[in-house]
Each structure stands twice: as C-alpha cells, then as structure tokens.
Amino acid sequence: MTTTRGRIDKRQAILEGAFTVFAREGYAQACVQAIAREAGVAKPTVYNHMTDKATLFRNALEAAARTILEQRIAALEPLAAPAGDGLRATLEEVAHALLRLHTDGRSCALRRLLYSEVTHFPDILDIVKESGPDRLNQALADRLARLALAGRLRAADPDLAAEQFLALLLGPLEARTQLGTRQLEDSQLRAMAVAAVDAFVRAWGAR
C-alpha cells in the first residue's frame, strides 16, 4: 500500500511539474530534466512513469483539465439549494466563481498551451474537452433541470440553457481578456457575471 501510494504521489508530482514547465517554456523548449527538477524526482523516474515527452505532455494537460473541471463543478454547488427568493443572487455567485476560475493562472496556461500546440497535437483538444467543457455543461444542465422541475426556471431544454449560460459568461470574457493574455479586475468579473445572469434570467426565468 505504501509503495502504491508513493508511486501515485510521484506520478502526481511529475504531472504537476510537467504542466508548470510546459506552461512556462512551451512544449519545444521544455526538457525532461527541467520537469524532473520541478517535480523533485530523478530524470529516470519521469521515464519510468511516462514513456516519452509527448506522452508526458498529453497526460499533464489531461490532469490539469481534470483539476480545473473539479473546481468548476464545485463552484456549481450553490445551485443545489438556492434561497427561496435568491435564485438570481445564487446564479450571480456561481457565474462570478466560474469567471474567476476561468481567469486563474492554471486555466489561462492551459488555454495558451492548447492554442500554441494544437496543430502539433490535434488530439489534445479532444483530451481536454473530455475533462472540460462538455462535462461542465452536463453538470450545469443537471442543476438547471432540477431548478426547472422545482418551477424556478423555464428550462424546457436544460442542455441548451446550460450552453447559453456558459456562452454568456465566457464569450465576452475571451474578448475582454484577449484570449487570456490580459488580466481583469475582480469588479469587472463581477459586473460581467451580473450582466450574463440578467440576460439568462430574461430568457429562461420562470414566468
């Protein structure tokens, strides 16, 4: 058990170290020795866990996307039990949390790597999507469906409602942050959350 736990911990450290180095230096410039140093392991240990640099890159991006997804799904939790008259406030809270997560360092680094390396690694888009947008949309749709059943929303199509909610948030964000290269103030994120929720409630609010 201890040996297994140690192997899992080393693998996690390698993936974290790899993502940090790839995000900082890009795929071409990153070297396995630097990744080993960042992870606090010997270079042969990296190869014991990952057969080559390309495999390490794919696994590091998948692990980062999975961590980001877990944080975003956790941010949806307030929708499980919004206050009786506070659905709009709860939606704004969730929207603001999602915007903050979308603009944090890990999320921006992941998008930069996708943009820069997708032509060399066409499969990474599917790898990241599997642990990212599609799963988040499904989780959000599930919560919106429950709110619709409770008469709080007019979401006849919760999948479409979830898709539009995220589009209202992330569409303007990509433009205003210039694809994640420009930092926004938290007050700007909050204002964007309020505007997105206002449009969403007008379209999907119970009547």
Image: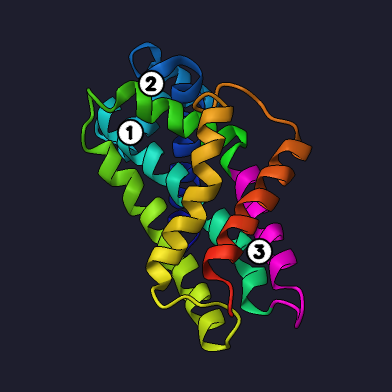
Q: Residue 32 carries which label?
A: 2
Residue 115 at x, y percent in the picture: 36, 26
- Whole-number angstrom distance, CA of label 2 to CA of label 1: 9 Å
Span shown in magenta: 82-101
**Disc 1 residue crowd, few under 14, some 14–19, many 20+, Cα 10 Å:** many
Cβ atoms at labels 2 and 1 below 8 Å apart:
yes
Can the viewer see residue 81?
A: yes
Provide the residue designation for mark 3. Answer: 91
Magenta stretch containing residue 74, yes or no? Answer: no
Provide the residue designation for mark 1. Answer: 56
63 sits left or right of 121 in the view: right
Residue 17 at x, y percent in the picture: 50, 31
- Whole-number angstrom distance, CA of label 2 to CA of label 3: 43 Å
**Which colour scheme appears in the figure?**
rainbow
Residue 92, by quadrant, is bottom right
- Quarter of the picture holding the C terminus: bottom right
Can the viewer see residue 44?
A: no
Please determine whether, in this image, residue 124 is positioned above or below residue 193.
above
Q: Which mark is residue 98?
A: none
Residue type for callout 2:
Val
Please determine whether, in this image, residue 39 is positioned above or below residue 69.
above
Please count the marks in the image: 3
Q: Residue at x 75, y 83 (%)?
A: 84
User: Looking at the magenta stretch, what is its main secondary structure?
Assistant: helix
